[in-house]
């Protein structure tokens, strides 16, 4: 017995000693550290630089010195870049906004990211504190917690001593809901002397403030110490955030200068296509990508747990994701070569004319596009549809399979699980694919009515032997190479043929419109909305007509030269109704650039990849209304009647509504490939399953896995997301 008491005494002394140390000495609190040391002084040499400039071109190059406490990052080879423009696509209908504006930053560099990626995968950010998601892992309400405790039902009542077991109360005469020590039980008061009112009213037992004025019981010194420590900690955090803010400001200045050099080189190439300008553009592209890689290496070592400014945290987060440029140099070079090889196949594809074997060299633009839009010959349309896919998509199938693997690899280097997560990230949604499905299901009833009406009209035109009243519509008779816009067959399916929809091209020609006048009208439209007037440099530097003395890439695009002053539009404008709408669309991008010029460069892009296009489309819809065209003097008689209104709205639906199932199918197809839900042996079959599921469209002839029909669409070989 004495030995037992001795052991208890020893344990008691140890516990008392430990408590004494904790309350008198205290555990040391680690101070927050920022993995960003003081920056070296700025270089005094020409051009941006925080250190020695890499010799990548004629201009002095940028360099970020070694990160605080870290070694300098590796220099990649042949990376890609983001020219800050919105370029059009060479293969689509001009009526769609996506035909006019291709977001080049989606192809060449970092997408629009947000700080929500941090919460998408906590394993990537171990430096953040405990968050809400961790509660799930430690929640006592988890069924697994109780299932483990009740294995084999050894304790069927929740345990051998469970108060909920009826057997426990069988002979006690009380309800299981009662507590044997419940103060509301009269028996408790009967035997508990401390609940007696005699003691409640006795002044000797009152808990008055007898010690409130005794200095021996005060702890003012410790309170003052806690306040002082908290103040010092706040000052340290503020100093660290100020250091990050200063550093990001310096990086933003260098990024803007490097972006200007790169965009200028890309502009020179696209407005004057030759070998020299192409080499200059590639050199600038590589240079800018290396700068992005240096910034990326620095941002990765920043301690984000000490950043409590949401704006700073978002900037660091956006700079920490650079897309394919994060790949090692050898893989990045392979990635770029695959895209370039597929684009060479796409741009070089040509076919021979139907039943004219010696009339060859027909390309997608303008010959094949014109045939698909205007021909009503079933056999000719079938021939063109098949031959274009045979010469373009089928040839690049093996290259695309390799590109998928590298895209997933690049996503992992940016801390995403696969390409689907990486492409969905800019939209700030944990369920982006489901969100698109939900929106489509809301629009589906309207589309089903449009589809049924169009199928009936085409069946009347081509005959019941060609089109079944219950089957999907063949893809090749919809007026577009991809069936994504049906506006070219309005002459067949217009609801009121005698009341033609608005077409103001003749009026524009009669009134002497020029490309310059069209853009001046667009500027007046935005000035009427109290927007900013365009700077004089815009009119001097923009390319608004196709140059007669040199080749140029004519896809309409808006350009931000990253210096807050130089904005341009490149468009081979013709005096037509649709180009008038396009001019307003492109001008919307310029106004967006101008209004965001005061923000850091990383915040000057759209809020997400679809935001810019949404703004441009909204402006285009406003400009194309009959009432606005009347204010321009292009419509001289009233068209305010039901027939004209229905024709106008139906024409819009043929361009906007029917495009949605095509875009949804294309993005869902690539998401399923990136996430490995389908294998390479199912690429073509899965594509047509999705086209039929979303759009009710089928191929004109049987297809097989020898074909690769999605590859005939520009965005697939260019590896550009379509969710915009």
Image (cartoon, rainbow, N blue to C red):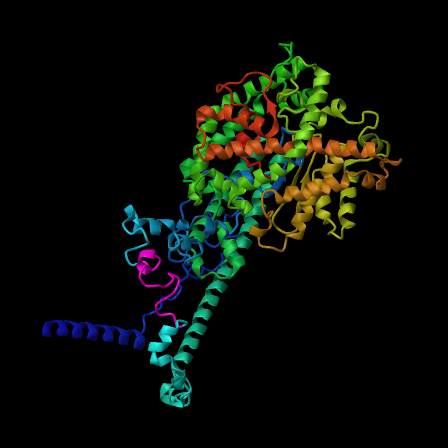
- Highlighted magenta segment, given as a residue range: 162-183
Is residue 402 placed above or below 319 in the rendered structure? Answer: above
Q: Residue furthest left?
A: 2
Q: Position of residue 411 (x, y in %)?
A: 45, 41
Quadrant of res 211? bottom left
Q: Is residue 30 above or below residue 516?
A: below
Q: Residue at x 74, y 25 (%)?
A: 490
Q: Nearer the viewer, residue 88 or 401?
A: 401
In-front residue for pair 545/24: 24
Q: Is residue 38 visible?
A: yes
Q: Main secondary structure of the magenta part?
A: loop
Residue at image location 53% in from the left, 52% down from the top: 254
Quadrant where the C terminus is found in the figure: top right
Taking depth in this image into account, of 33 and 199 the one nearest to the observer is 199
Is residue 44 among what the camera can see? no
Q: Position of residue 326 (x, y in %)?
A: 44, 43
Query: Can you give x and y, in whole percent of width and height, for residue 527 in the image?
Result: 77, 50
Residue 511 pos. (x, y %) = 86, 34
Q: Does residue 347 lie above or below 280 as drawn? A: above
* Quadrant of image for the N terminus: bottom left
Image side of residue 655 versus residue 495, left or right: left
Image quarter of residue 160: bottom left
The residue at the point 80 percent across, 30 percent down is 501
Asked whether residue 167 is drawn in magenta, I would say yes
């Amino acid at each position: 017995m004495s030995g037992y008491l001795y052991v208890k005494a020893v344990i008691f002394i140890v516990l008392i000693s430990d408590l004494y140390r904790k309350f008198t000495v205290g555990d040391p609190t680690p101070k927050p550290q920022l993995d960003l040391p003081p920056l070296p002084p700025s270089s005094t040499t020409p051009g941006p630089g925080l250190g020695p400039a890499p010799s990548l071109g004629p201009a002095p190059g940028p360099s970020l010195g070694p990160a605080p406490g870290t070694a300098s990052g590796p220099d990649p080879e042949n990376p890609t870049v983001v020219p800050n423009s919105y370029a059009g696509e060479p293969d689509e209908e001009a009526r769609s906004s996506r035909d006019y504006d291709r977001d080049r930053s989606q192809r060449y560099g970092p997408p629009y990211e947000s700080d929500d990626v941090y919460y998408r995968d906590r394993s990537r950010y171990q430096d953040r504190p405990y968050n809400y998601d961790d509660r799930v892992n430690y929640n006592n309400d988890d069924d697994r917690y109780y299932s483990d405790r009740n294995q084999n039902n050894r304790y069927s009542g929740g345990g051998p001593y469970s108060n909920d077991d009826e057997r426990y109360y069988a002979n006690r005469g009380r309800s299981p809901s009662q507590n044997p020590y419940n103060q509301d039980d009269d028996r408790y008061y009967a035997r508990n002397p401390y609940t007696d009112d005699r003691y409640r009213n006795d002044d000797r037992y009152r808990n008055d403030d007898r010690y409130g004025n005794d200095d021996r019981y005060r702890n003012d010194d410790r309170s003052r110490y806690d306040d002082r420590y908290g103040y010092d900690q706040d000052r340290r955090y503020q100093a660290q955030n100020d250091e990050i803010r200063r550093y990001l400001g310096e990086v933003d200045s260098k990024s803007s200068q490097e972006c200007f050099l790169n965009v200028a080189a890309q502009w020179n190439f696209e407005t004057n296509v030759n070998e020299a300008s192409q080499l200059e553009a590639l050199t600038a592209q590589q240079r800018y990508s290396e700068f992005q890689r240096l910034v990326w290496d620095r941002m990765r070592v920043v301690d984000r747990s000490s950043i409590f400014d949401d704006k700073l945290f978002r900037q660091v987060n956006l700079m920490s994701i650079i897309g394919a440029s994060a790949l090692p140099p050898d893989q990045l070079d392979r990635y770029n070569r695959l895209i370039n090889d597929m684009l060479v196949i796409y741009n070089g594809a040509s076919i021979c004319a139907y039943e004219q074997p010696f009339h060859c060299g027909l390309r997608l633009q303008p010959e094949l596009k014109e045939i698909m839009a205007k021909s009503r010959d079933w056999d000719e349309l079938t021939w063109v549809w098949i031959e274009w896919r045979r010469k373009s998509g089928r040839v690049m199938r093996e290259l695309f399979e390799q590109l998928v693997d590298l895209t997933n690899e690049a996503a992992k280097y940016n801390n995403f699980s696969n390409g689907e997560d990486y492409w969905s990230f800019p939209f700030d949604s944990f369920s982006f694919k489901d969100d698109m499905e939900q929106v489509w299901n809301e629009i589906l009833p309207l589309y089903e009515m449009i589809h049924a009406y169009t199928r009936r009209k085409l069946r009347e035109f081509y005959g019941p032997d060609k089109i079944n009243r219950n089957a999907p519509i063949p893809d090749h008779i919809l007026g577009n190479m991809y069936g994504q816009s049906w506006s070219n067959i309005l002459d067949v399916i217009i609801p009121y043929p005698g009341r033609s929809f608005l077409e103001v091209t003749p009026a524009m020609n009669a009134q002497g419109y020029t490309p310059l006048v069209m853009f001046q009208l667009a500027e007046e439209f935005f000035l009427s909305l109290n927007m900013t007037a365009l700077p004089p440099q815009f009119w001097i530097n923009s390319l608004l007509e196709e140059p007669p003395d040199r080749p140029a890439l004519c896809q309409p695009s808006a350009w931000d030269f990253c210096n807050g002053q130089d904005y341009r539009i490149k468009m081979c404008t013709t005096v037509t109704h649709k180009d008038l709408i396009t001019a307003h669309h492109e001008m919307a991008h310029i106004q967006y650039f101008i209004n965001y010029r005061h923000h850091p460069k990383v915040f000057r892009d759209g809020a997400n990849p679809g935001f810019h296009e949404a703004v441009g489309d909204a402006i285009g819809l406003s400009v194309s209304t009959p009432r606005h065209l009347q204010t321009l003097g292009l419509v001289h008689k009233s068209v305010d009647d039901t027939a004209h209104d229905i024709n106008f709205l139906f024409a819009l639906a043929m361009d906007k509504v029917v495009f949605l199932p095509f875009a949804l199918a294309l993005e869902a197809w690539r998401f399923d490939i990136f996430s490995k839900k389908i294998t390479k042996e199912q690429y073509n079959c899965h594509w047509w399953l999705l086209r039929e599921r979303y759009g009710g469209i089928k191929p004109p002839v049987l297809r097989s896995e020898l074909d690769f029909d999605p590859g005939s669409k520009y965005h697939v070989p260019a590896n550009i997301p379509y969710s915009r």
